[in-house]
């Protein structure tokens, strides 16, 4: 049976048709919202049009009950599920980073990001006034795709600020108990800079442990959450959108070394004594990583992702200098290191 | 076919309402149903502007309730038999509320006859006895993106150009008027407070400045935050109707310009989304040219080629980075 799954963000609608096609439709400009009539009909009609459909389908819409559009959709010919309910019942180990909120299986939390938090991580010598103005204009006209270097830097700084706020809100118990972690959400829609994504994740994560980090760049987890009563079906559709396996991440401050066991039984010791981020590029083989902790051993299987296995031995909580220049020097050094990793991975994959 | 959002900034409304009120209770001269022109007198009253508190030293030479004239000596400070200091009346009026303890008094300006004109051509829809009238008129309604301050109405005056206001001096020519410009800076706003400007309509204004300082004088920004231009079509229209009576409603935020003619650019486009076509006039939301206006000159696979009016340059943009203002 044809089914259209929709997720309503504060600025756009993300629709997934049978797991075959996705489309994102931008909502009317918030500043002029009252000047448009039949908003839901127009947005829904536009989604159908862009998907090449002529008539309405069996549709499930996930929408936060606090959002402006919720009362406009409720009572229409589609099934509406409050996002809070859909995400908690869907119960996937995810962190869904939205424009105004973060969702995880424990619930929904408001993100209170201000322009200073974005400016803190903005790359260029720019006045705070200009960044604030651009930040506020996003509320008036909604976000536009990041095209210029300036916009990309703004987007990255915004994601970093959001991710740090989000990881402070999500329960550490949840993070400690999951091994796979899905990063998703409209704030990350179409974000292709995996190096920055990984760095943002490492800088935001304050819990120690191991995670296989996946990334849902099309934010399909949002629409799929509406299928929570039929989770099997949702997961079947999910298989059509293979998530990027970004990295297998160890956040292990104070660990001096790791033993790596290859498939053929050969062993190698990785020196982690120097505090920082270390990477083991992987091709296709599955490795076993053994770590000796204060309270016993820790052993995990790791396999290829965009970055392979990543060991972050920096002490938590991370301290970021108040001095812009110092903060940027440290971050740029890590960036250079990550770029180096990228080339290693490239050459390693080419050899395969 | 690429699709884009329609920007709904303008509306030509045949049933727009303008309220005109007397500054003090007086007499309304028209009845409901009556047709009025812009300069029709619709009410009158006796009105006195705000009184002014003045401090004094020594002795007052005028008594409470006494009539005084501009530059007349009001108080004198003596040292022995010699006069060491004196204070004069800043304007003509009546002495009131003398407070010997705190050495202050007020001068109230003399009440003068005030005539209320309609400001907008139309039909009187209703009358609030002795106080105000509501006029139904045809108007261009411009929707802003940010507004702060109280509703005000007054004569429109245009300064600078649509992009910025560098070199613009606000002075007594702008007293009691609504100023339209490209960008409002803190210098202009301070001078406007000094000279009693009623309101501003601008393309852009800094967000931080709006948050901290704007409020005394009403302000509506039509493009966004930052050094952003006003849509040149709107700016040129304002220039063409300079000295016309307009209304600012910052709470909506909306600007009402009474307009009997039908204007093509203000008609807008029906719907929410439209096919992207060559010749359409668009607003750009790309950071480096945020708020600028352009014309679509070509369409490629996933991109739209827009010729920026101000620069003549052609940009390649995603359809999500533009909003269609008018069809060709």
Image (spheres, coloured by chain):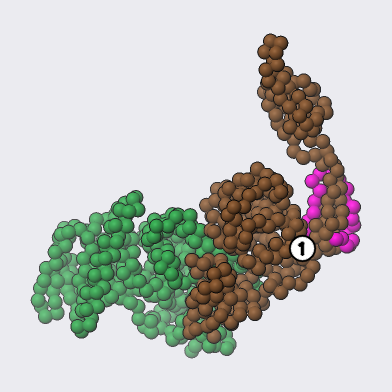
Chain A as rendered: colour? green
Residue B55 on image: x %, y %: 68, 26
Name the residue beneath numbered marker 1. Answer: B258
Which segment did they paint magenta?
B16-37
The stretch drawn in magenta includes residue B18:
yes
Side of B293 where A267 appears, left or right: left
Is A58 placed above or below B154 here?
below
User: Is residue A113 at least partly visible in the picture?
Assistant: yes
The stretch drawn in magenta includes residue A26:
no
User: Is residue A27 at least partly visible in the picture?
Assistant: no
Residue at image location 61% in from the left, 75% down from the top: B281
Residue at image location 74% in from the left, 35% down from the top: B51
| Front residue of this view, candidates A339 and A174 | A339
What's the chain of the residue with tag 1?
B
Residue at image location 44% in from the left, 86% down from the top: A20
Side of B16 where A99 appears, left or right: left
Chain B as rendered: colour? brown
Is A212 placed above or below B215 here?
below
Q: In which quarter of the image is residue A258?
A: bottom left
């Amino acid at each position: 049976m044809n089914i259209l799954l929709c997720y309503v963000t504060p600025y756009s609608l993300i629709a997934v048709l049978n797991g075959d096609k996705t489309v994102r439709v931008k909502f009317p400009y918030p500043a002029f919202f009252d000047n448009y009539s039949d908003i839901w009909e127009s947005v829904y009609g536009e989604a159908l049009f862009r998907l090449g459909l002529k008539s309405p389908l069996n549709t499930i819409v996930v929408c936060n009950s606090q959002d402006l559009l919720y009362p406009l959709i409720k009572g229409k010919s589609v099934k509406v599920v409050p996002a809070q309910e859909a995400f908690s019942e869907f119960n996937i180990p995810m962190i869904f980073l939205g424009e105004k909120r973060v969702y995880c299986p424990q619930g929904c939390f408001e993100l209170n990001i201000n322009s200073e938090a974005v400016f803190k991580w903005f790359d260029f010598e720019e006045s705070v006034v200009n960044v604030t103005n651009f930040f506020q204009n996003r509320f008036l006209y909604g976000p536009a795709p990041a095209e210029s270097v300036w916009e990309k830097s703004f987007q990255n700084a915004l994601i970093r600020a959001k991710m740090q706020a989000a990881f402070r809100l999500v329960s550490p118990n949840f993070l400690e108990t999951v091994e796979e972690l899905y990063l998703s959400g409209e704030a990350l829609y179409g974000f292709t800079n995996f190096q920055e994504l990984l760095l943002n994740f490492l800088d935001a994560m304050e819990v120690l442990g191991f995670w296989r980090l996946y990334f849902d760049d099309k934010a399909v987890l949002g629409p799929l959450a509406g299928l929570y009563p039929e989770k099997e079906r949702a997961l079947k559709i999910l298989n059509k959108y293979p998530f990027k396996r970004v990295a297998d991440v160890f956040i292990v401050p104070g660990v001096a070394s790791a033993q790596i066991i290859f498939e053929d039984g050969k062993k190698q010791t990785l020196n982690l004594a120097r505090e920082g981020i270390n990477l083991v590029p992987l091709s296709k083989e599955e490795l076993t990583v053994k770590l000796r902790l204060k309270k016993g051993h820790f052993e995990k299987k790791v396999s290829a992702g965009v970055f392979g296995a990543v060991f972050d031995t920096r002490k938590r909580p991370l301290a970021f200098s108040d001095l812009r220049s110092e903060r940027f020097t440290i971050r740029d050094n890590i960036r250079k290191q990550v770029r180096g990793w990228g080339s290693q991975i490239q050459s390693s994959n080419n050899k395969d | 076919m690429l699709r884009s959002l329609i920007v709904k900034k303008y509306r030509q409304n045949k049933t727009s309402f303008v309220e005109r009120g007397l500054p003090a209770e007086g007499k309304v001269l028209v009845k409901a149903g009556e047709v009025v022109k812009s300069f029709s007198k619709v009410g009158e009253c006796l009105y006195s502007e705000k009184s002014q508190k003045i401090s004094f030293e020594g002795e007052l030479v005028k008594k409470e309730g006494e009539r005084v004239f501009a530059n007349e000596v009001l108080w004198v400070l003596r040292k022995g038999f010699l006069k060491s200091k004196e204070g004069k009346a800043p304007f003509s009026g009546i002495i009131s509320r003398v407070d010997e303890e705190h050495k202050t008094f007020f001068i109230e300006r003399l009440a003068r006859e005030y005539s209320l004109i309609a400001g907008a051509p139309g039909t009187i829809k209703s009358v609030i006895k002795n106080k105000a009238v509501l006029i139904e008129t045809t108007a261009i309604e411009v929707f802003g993106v940010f507004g702060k301050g109280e509703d005000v109405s007054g004569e429109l005056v245009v300064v600078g150009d649509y992009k910025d206001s560098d070199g613009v001096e606000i002075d007594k020519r702008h007293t009691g008027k609504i100023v339209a410009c490209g960008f409002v800076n803190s210098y202009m706003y301070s001078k406007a407070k000094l000279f009693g400007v009623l309101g501003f309509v601008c393309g852009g204004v800094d967000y931080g400045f709006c948050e901290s300082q704007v409020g005394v004088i009403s302000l509506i920004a039509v493009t966004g935050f930052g050094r952003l231009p006003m849509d040149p079509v709107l700016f040129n229209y304002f220039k063409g109707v300079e000295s016309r009576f307009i209304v600012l409603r910052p709470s909506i935020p909306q600007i009402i310009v009474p307009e009997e003619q039908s204007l093509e650019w203000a008609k807008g486009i029906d719907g929410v989304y439209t096919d992207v076509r060559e010749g359409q006039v668009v607003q750009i939301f790309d950071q480096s040219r945020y708020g600028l206006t352009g014309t679509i000159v070509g369409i490629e696979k996933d991109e739209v080629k827009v010729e920026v009016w101000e620069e003549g340059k052609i940009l390649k943009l995603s359809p999500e980075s533009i909003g269609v203002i008018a069809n060709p």
